Image (tube, grey):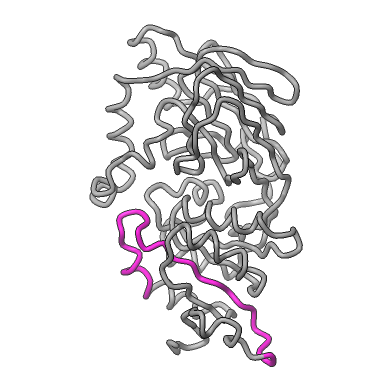
């Protein structure tokens, strides 16, 4: 146990589980989950500053030792009901693991989640206007409020902010780790530029709230975020994270290679509400069908291959701690 002013930080082990909390101690309990490999691999150096900031919050904090993603997926559903808050220090993939654990529980046991960004891109933290500085993100928790947000489900897996396939969609997990450590988000941009000369398109149909769309497309993103891979940007007026709908972006394949490059470059600059290059719309249920298996990316991680898969939106299914800078307008405006 590490004793710091106003902070009780416990290391969770099999022996200490169940013995951590006094029945007379009425402080709230928080579980701190850290992905030490996120981003440029600097989380171990930021940990001291994060703990110092946590000392200002009225929580008994339990630090979960490093776990593999598989171990986290197994252990978290069993542990979460014992806590009042989950703090995830890591990137979008870390948040996805915690979200899947929360969604495996009945709604009444889904405790709020606080995100401390420490990944390469941290798309969802950007959407929520959480500081990308881990220490400042903890400080924001002092006045943060829980907001129930929508969660997507692709097959049996849940996702927080995006499920996608096609151009650029696999950059987050195919970019070499060493390059990400050295260059951070710039590594994704470099890989994206390299990929412009080798774009792959897919023939598929998608049924959105009963309306079928067919065609050949370079890119598909089903998102609930203003930032996708740090490359594609949506405006506040295009996204509402708690309205029961996700945003669908389809970029058509113009067939000619030089037109493909020009189309993708134009979309990266400005995502339209719909034109000759793209389809952009909102929906609450989606069904994708194709002749060939299409590899999906879920919250920046490989999500499997499918020829026939449905996506369901769970309305306001999980509570996220939102900083005051987020603002009420971010959840009630959409073009």
Residue 258 position (above or below residue 303)? above
**Whole-percent x, y for residue 335 in the image:** 67, 29
The answer to whether 252 appears left or right of 265 in the picture is: right
Residue drawn at (65%, 72%), measured in percent from left and top? 84
Q: Residue furthest top?
A: 256
**Quarter where residue 98 is shown:** bottom right
Can residue 7 be seen by looking at this rendering?
no
Q: Quadrant of the N terminus?
A: bottom left
Depth check, front residue: 325 or 78: 78
Residue drawn at (68%, 86%), measured in percent from left and top? 26
The answer to whether 237 appears left or right of 138 in the picture is: right
Residue 15 position (above or below residue 171)? below
Depth check, front residue: 329 or 291: 291
Residue 275 position (above or below residue 333)? above
Q: How many marks?
A: 0
**Whole-percent x, y for residue 133 in the image:** 41, 60
**Quarter where residue 91 is shown:** bottom left
**Whole-percent x, y for residue 186 in the image:** 30, 41
The answer to whether 219 appears left or right of 286 in the picture is: left
Magenta stretch: includes residue 31: yes
**Quarter where residue 195 is shown:** top left
The answer to whether 145 appears left or right of 31 in the picture is: right
Magenta stretch: includes residue 132: no
**Whole-percent x, y for residue 70 in the image:** 47, 57
Residue drawn at (60%, 23%), measured in percent from left and top? 280
Can residue 285 be seen by looking at this rendering?
yes
Residue drawn at (56%, 35%), measured in percent from left and top? 235
The range drawn in magenta is 23-48
């Amino acid at each position: 146990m590490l004793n710091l002013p106003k902070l009780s930080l416990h290391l969770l082990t099999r022996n200490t589980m169940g013995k951590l909390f006094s029945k007379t101690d009425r402080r709230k309990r928080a579980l701190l989950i850290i992905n030490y490999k996120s981003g440029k691999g600097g989380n171990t150096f930021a940990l001291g500053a994060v703990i110092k900031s946590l000392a200002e919050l009225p929580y008994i904090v339990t630090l979960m030792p490093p776990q593999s993603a598989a171990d986290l997926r197994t252990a978290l559903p069993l542990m979460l009901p014992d806590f009042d808050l989950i703090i995830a220090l890591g990137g979008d993939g870390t948040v996805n693991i915690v979200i899947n654990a929360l969604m495996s529980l009945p709604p009444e046991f889904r405790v709020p989640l606080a995100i401390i960004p420490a990944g390469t891109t941290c798309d969802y933290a950007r959407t929520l206007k959480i500081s990308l500085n881990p220490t400042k993100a903890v400080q924001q928790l002092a006045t943060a409020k829980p907001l129930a947000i929508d969660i997507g489900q692709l097959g049996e897996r849940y996702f927080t902010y995006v499920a996608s396939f096609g151009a650029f969609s696999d950059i987050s997990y195919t970019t070499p780790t060493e390059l990400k450590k050295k260059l951070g988000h710039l590594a994704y941009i470099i890989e994206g530029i390299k990929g412009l000369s080798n774009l792959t398109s897919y023939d598929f149909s998608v049924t959105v709230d009963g309306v079928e769309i067919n065609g050949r497309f370079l890119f598909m993103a089903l998102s609930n975020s203003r930032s996708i891979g740090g490359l594609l940007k949506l405006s506040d007026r295009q996204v509402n994270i708690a309205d029961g709908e996700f945003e669908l972006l389809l970029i058509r394949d113009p067939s000619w290679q030089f037109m493909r490059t020009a189309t993708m470059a134009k979309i990266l600059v400005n995502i339209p509400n719909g034109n000759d290059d793209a389809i952009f719309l909102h929906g609450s249920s989606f069904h994708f069908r194709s002749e060939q298996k299409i590899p999906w990316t879920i919250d920046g991680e490989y999500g499997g291959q499918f020829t026939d898969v449905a996506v369901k939106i769970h309305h306001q299914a999980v509570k996220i701690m939102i900083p005051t800078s987020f603002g009420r307008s971010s959840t009630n405006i959409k073009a």
